[in-house]
Image: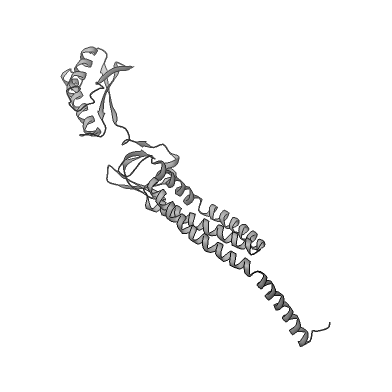
Amino acid sequence: MNLLTVSEWVTLIYGKLERWWTHLIRMVPNIVVALVVLILFIFLARLTKKLAFRVLHRLSGKDAISSFIATVMNMLVIILGIFIALNILKLEAAVTSLLAGASIIGLAVGFAFQDLTANFISGAYIAFRKPFEVGDLIETNAFLGNVEKINLRSTTIRTFEGLHVLLPNKEIFQKPIINYSRSSERKIELTFNIPQKANLQEIKDKLLRKVSSIEYLHDNKPAEFYYTAPDGANLKGVLSVWIHNHQPPGYLQTRHEVLMLATDVLKESGIIS
């Protein structure tokens, strides 16, 4: 094997550097254009972030969600600018490698944080569609209480027992939600067992007359009482009244008063002792 002499090494290295320098000089216009494009995209990313935050905050009213999505959009615009700049520099191979690497990383992150991603998407849905808001009385996942916080990952509900329940947004998104605060009116139903041998019509009339004395019941929906089904020697009777949901004294207090008045009628009639 013939070894290169020192002069040959010098000539080889010099020739290589000369070709690189020549290529660099030829690429100066591309480098300038790539830098200009990159700077423009950086400014565009900042503008996009500001506009996106304003629009999203107006729609959702949530700082955390609006800021997060605006930051993601900012990063996407910058990444797009980097890819375009690399294409201008004729570095298509680098762009392909970056895309392949980003795809692999994206899949790995997606699998690793699939629950977190699902909670975030559900949180964004809750923020924009607003099936409930802070202060609403809701029932979901067997929990009943008032909404105290709506975050990206979870929603905090305070139950009537004073307990704070943190529910992942994914669980709320996938399960039925009852929002008691959205209804302007609400129905109260109570079921009683009335002996068939009793004077059924008289008991019905007394119950309706008694509960109708409550002043704050719904004006256009009078109290109703129906016998629904036999139960051995008894008949099942359903007493129902309507209230204005957002006016005092509220559902629980009204239910309590209706129950007390109905119980008095049943005692007077000898149905219960």
Q: Quadrant of the C terminus?
A: top left
Display colour scheme: one colour
Residue that lies at the very extreme toward the bottom in this rendered image: 6
Residue 60 on image: x %, y %: 39, 46
**Up-down relation of residue 174 to residue 73 (above or below):** above
Q: Is residue 109 visible?
A: yes
Instruction: Give the residue at the far right of this rendering.
Output: 1
Q: Quadrant of residue 27?
A: bottom right
Q: Residue at x 50, y 53 (%)?
A: 113
Task: Report x, y in % for residue 176.
Answer: 41, 36
Left or right, 153 with respect to 145, comes to right
Count of numbered marks: 0
Identify which residue, 77 or 174, lies in the foreground: 77
68, 264: nearer the viewer: 68
* Figure quadrant of the N terminus: bottom right
Q: Pick the residue in front: 177 or 131.
A: 131
| For residue 100, side relative to residue 58 (left or right) | right
Q: Residue 101, position in %: x, y? A: 61, 59
Q: Nearer the viewer, residue 243 or 9?
A: 9
Residue at image coords 56%, 59%: 81
- The single residue placed furthest to the front in the displayed view is 29
Q: Is residue 16 left or right of residue 176?
A: right
Q: Residue at x 69, y 72 (%)?
A: 23
Decide: is 269 above or below 116: above
Left or right of residue 111: residue 158: left
- Image coords of residue 266 (percent x, y): 19, 20
Task: Using the image, determine if residue 212 lies above or below residue 36.
Answer: above
Residue 231 in view, yes or no: no
